[in-house]
Image (cartoon, rainbow, N blue to C red):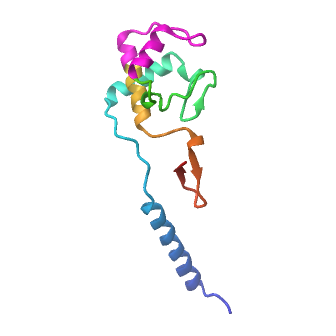
């Protein structure tokens, strides 16, 4: 039995539709919405770059390995804005105090808040499904 091109086309089209529906019907794990000022956050990114934070810290798993990944640091329980401000002011044994101005500090925190609001970044928290999609463990 020889397959006709129309049958192959219809079969592949049906597979495409089934796959598309399975993707769009899968619920998305969303974080709670955090409001932030986009202009201040974009200025905070410039502060991040000015002080070369990516040489030690990561965002979305990309960057240096001396410090922790800061993608979701704003929403970690027990941390947040006050904790970040304290570390920026005092530094740690490995992180120096950069003596940021209050304006730079607020912009950097707004940038970290916007990064945190963009989603989860730790790949160890996800399982890769057979269809290529990811889901939270």
Which residue is at a point 58% across and 61% down the rendered structure image? 131
Q: Is residue 111 visible?
A: yes
User: Residue 109: where, in percent of width, then height?
Assistant: 40, 22
Q: Identify which residue is drawn at 39% across, 14% down.
A: 104
Indicate the quadrant where residue 89 lies: top left
Whether 21 is drawn above or below 46: the answer is below
The magenta span reads 81-106
Residue 17 higher or lower than 77, as above or below: below
Quarter holding residue 75? top left
Disc tally is 0
Q: Answer left or right for 105 relative to 3.
A: left
3 lies left or right of 15: right
Report the residue that reaches farthest toward the bottom.
1
Whether the magenta-drawn stretch holds residue 26 is answered as no
Residue 129 placement, left or right of 84 = right
Quadrant into which the N terminus falls: bottom right
Location of residue 19 with respect to 121 vertically, above or below: below
Residue 33 x, y percent position in the rendering: 34, 39
Q: Position of residue 94 (x, y in %)?
A: 60, 12
Q: Residue furthest front?
A: 78
Identify the residue at image location x=54%, y=18%: 52
The answer to whether residue 98 of the structure is visible from this angle is no
Per the image, is 102 magenta?
yes
Q: Residue at x 48, y 61 (%)?
A: 23
Q: Nearer the viewer, residue 51 or 79?
A: 79
């Amino acid at each position: 039995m020889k397959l006709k091109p129309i049958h192959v086309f219809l079969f592949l089209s049906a597979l495409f539709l089934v796959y598309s529906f399975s993707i769009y019907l899968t619920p998305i794990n969303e974080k709670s919405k955090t409001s932030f000022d986009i202009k201040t956050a974009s200025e905070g990114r410039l502060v991040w770059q000015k002080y070369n934070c990516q040489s030690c810290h990561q965002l979305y798993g990309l960057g240096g390995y001396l410090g922790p990944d800061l993608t979701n640091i704003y929403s970690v329980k027990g941390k947040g804005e006050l904790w970040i401000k304290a570390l920026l002011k005092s530094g740690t044994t490995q992180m120096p105090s950069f003596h940021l101005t209050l304006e730079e500090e607020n912009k950097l925190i707004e940038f970290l808040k916007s990064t945190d609001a963009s989603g989860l970044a730790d790949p160890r928290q996800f399982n890769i499904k057979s269809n290529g999609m990811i889901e939270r463990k």
